Image (tube, rainbow, N blue to C red):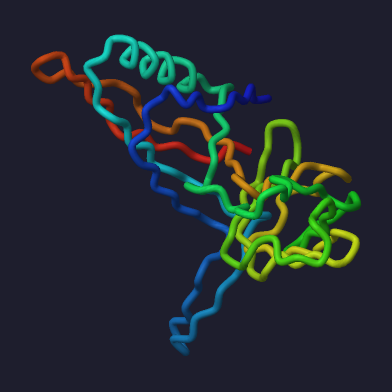
């Protein structure tokens, strides 16, 4: 099933987002030796999040929240949302994205270009998202610093394998990396006295 992906409206009043990464690596322990080994399964892990919302008595905000639930509870619709809470690029004039350099890349590294020359652009533990297709942005954590050479190229070391090979010149978000999510929970609301609406926390899962 193909997805229709929308950016999440800033009018949806989100109070907090909790993120988890599931899958990718499993741990097996031998019953005989008690030793543990870690195995990577599948092409990549999948992110999950829990969305918490601000209570409101404003009729327009209630309408917007119901619209969000009605739209994104559909099976073929997903929303694009930043997976970091603050911008990662703090140097004025630096780009907010770079691009994949060369098609056919796979695994735990990615060559990119379009960066400021000879600079440490991001540090290990920062995140990026790679535009694999029009409806698949893969969020990834850097395991080493993003340091560009004199031509503005850098070889990135990733925490998970690319789940598909991105095309040459695909966009890599480095300022506010993104995830594409689908609601994975029942929707609804509750009403307190004075018309204050509470919206339950909603689970969402990365769509790909």
Work out whether 197 lies above or below 46: above
Task: Find residue 67 and report its horizontal and vertical position in percent.
Answer: 42, 14
State the residue at coordinates (75%, 67%). Answer: 147
131 or 28, which is in the foreground? Answer: 131
Observer-nearest of 59 and 78: 59
Instruction: Identify the residue at the far front of this view.
Output: 92
Residue 117 at x, y = what percent? 83, 61
Direction from residue 108 to residue 32 in the image, left or right:
left
Up-down relation of residue 148 to residue 81 (above or below): below
Q: Residue at x 75, y 36 (%)?
A: 133
Name the residue located 64 percent from the left edge and 25 percent from the top edge.
Answer: 3
Foreground pick, 5 / 107 = 5
In the displayed structure image, the side of residue 134 where residue 84 appears, left or right: left
With respect to residue 181, does 154 lie above or below?
Answer: below
Q: Residue furthest left?
A: 193
Numbered-mark total: 0
Image quarter hosting the N terminus: top right
Front in this rendered view, residue 113 or 93: 93
Residue 6: where, in percent of width, then height?
Answer: 59, 24
Rendered position, 91 above or below 204: below
Residue depicted at x 49% and y 39%: 205
Quarter placement of the C terminus: top right
User: At which x and y percent is residue 20?
Assistant: 45, 52
The image quarter containing residue 132 is top right
Q: Is residue 111 left or right of residue 25?
A: right
């Amino acid at each position: 099933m193909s997805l229709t992906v929308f950016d999440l409206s800033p009018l949806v009043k989100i109070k907090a987002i909790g993120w988890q990464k599931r899958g990718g690596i499993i741990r097996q322990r031998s019953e005989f030796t008690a030793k543990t080994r870690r195995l990577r399964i599948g092409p990549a892990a999948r992110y999950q999040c829990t969305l918490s919302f601000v209570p409101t008595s404003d009729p327009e905000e209630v309408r917007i929240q119901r619209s969000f639930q009605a739209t994104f509870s559909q099976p073929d619709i997903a929303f694009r949302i930043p997976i970091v809470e603050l911008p990662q690029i703090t140097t004025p004039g630096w780009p907010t994205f770079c691009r994949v350099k060369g098609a056919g890349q796979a695994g735990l590294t990615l060559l990119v270009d379009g960066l400021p020359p000879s600079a440490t652009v991001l540090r290990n533990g920062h995140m990026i998202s790679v535009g694999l297709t029009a409806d698949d942005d893969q969020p990834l954590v850097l395991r080493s610093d993003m340091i560009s050479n004199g031509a503005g190229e850098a070889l990135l070391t990733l925490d998970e394998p690319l789940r598909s090979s991105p095309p040459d010149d695909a966009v890599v978000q480095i300022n506010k990396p993104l995830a594409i999510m689908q609601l994975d929970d029942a929707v609804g609301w509750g009403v307190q006295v004075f018309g204050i609406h509470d919206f339950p926390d909603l689970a969402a899962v990365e769509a790909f």
